[in-house]
Amino acid sequence: MIFGNGVDNVELTRIQQALVRRPAFANQVLTKNEEEKFLNLSSEHRKVEFLAGRWAAKEAFAKAYGTGFGKKLSMHDLEVANDELGKPYFVKSPFIGAAHLSISHSKLEAIAFVVLEKN
């Protein structure tokens, strides 16, 4: 049974500007594991894409979960990884059930879609 679904998109320029204005911005969004991967990316453009994708994924999750971000949920309560084929998935979340995730990028933006499913 579907518990909730959420979608979010973010312009890459918005994320890039946030990184320039606040170098600690990535730390506010990413967990330690995500940040390690982020820091090892080869180009600044790929870092912006990665961070925008994680931002969109976490925002989409918060919408699907029904709480938004605040007292019940923070960006660090969620962690996204990729399987051996590159498929993104949540390795950390407060949701008990299946969390389905898709992330996509274009030249201008990143988008993520989340479906939360309970047995």
Image: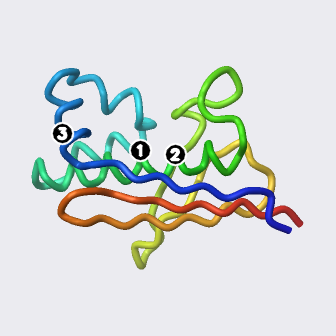
Amino acid carrying label 3: it is: Gln
- Separation of marks 3 and 1 at Cα, in angstroms: 12 Å
- Separation of marks 3 and 2 at Cα, in angstroms: 18 Å
As drawn, 38 above or below 3: above
As drawn, 108 above or below 92: below
CB of mark 1 within 8 Å of CB of mark 2? Answer: yes
Where does label 1 land, which residue? 55
Percent position (x, y) of residue 75? 52, 34
Where does label 2 land, which residue? 58
Local crowd size for mark 3, using a 10 Å CA cut-off: few (<14), some (14–19), many (≥20): some
Amino acid carrying label 1: it is: Trp
Ranked by sequence position, the earlier of labels 3 and 2 is 3
Amino acid carrying label 2: it is: Lys
Percent position (x, y) of residue 51? 31, 46
Number of dots carrying numbers: 3
Front-most of 100 and 91? 100
State the residue lying farthest toward the right.
119
SS for tag 3? helix
At 67% from the left and 51% from the top, the residue drawn is 64
Left or right, 60 with reference to 97: left
Percent position (x, y) of residue 1? 86, 68
At 18% from the left and 44% from the top, the residue drawn is 13
Front-most of 68 and 89? 68
Q: Which mark is residue 16?
A: 3
